[in-house]
Image (spheres, rainbow, N blue to C red):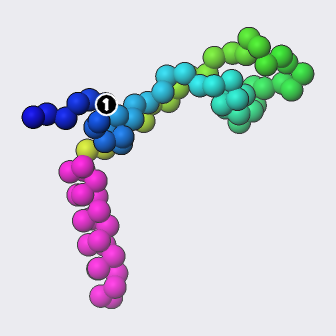
Amino acid sequence: MSIDKSLKLKGKLVRPRNVFTRKERIQILRQEGRWNPAESVYGIPKVKVVKLKQKSKSEQKAKEKAEEALAAGKAKK
């Protein structure tokens, strides 16, 4: 019998958000230098959402092995 979608692991259900809250948008605008404190918090400009590409597990394992090999090489010297 299969597992219902609502019971799957939480980590697998996490998706990138395509909308920020007002507070998050103001923080991003401050970092970019586009926020004026005198402005109203209503009608603030939209902020582009940067979606991060997730690496596959095999890529992560290969990277870890390469780092371990470098560390082992440095330890021998």
| Residue tagged 1 | 6
Give the class, few, some or many, for how many residues have Cα within 10 Å of label 1's Cα (few <14, many ≥20): few
Residue 2 position within the rendered picture, expressed as x and y whole percent measured from the top left? 13, 33
Q: Is residue 36 left or right of residue 63?
A: right
Side of 38 where 14 appears, left or right: left
Q: Is residue 65 magenta?
A: yes
Residue lying at 84% horizontally and 24% vertically, measured from the top left:
36
Element carrying mark 1:
helix
Majority SS type along the magenta span: helix
Residue 29 seen in this snapshot: no
User: Image quadrant for the C terminus?
Assistant: bottom left
* Drawn side of residue 3 relative to residue 19, left or right: left
- Residue 41 falls within the magenta-colored stretch: no
Of 2 and 10, nearer the camera is 2
Q: Position of residue 35 (x, y in %)?
A: 78, 26
The amino acid marked with disc number 1 is: Ser
Q: Which one is in front, 16 or 48?
A: 16
List x then y, in percent, for residue 60: 28, 53
Return the residue nearer the eye: 39 or 62: 39
Residue at the location (31% across, 30% down)? 6
* Residue at 66% in and 31% down: 24
Judged left or right of residue 5, residue 31 is right
Residue 23 shows in this picture = yes
Give the extent of the magenta segment.
57-77
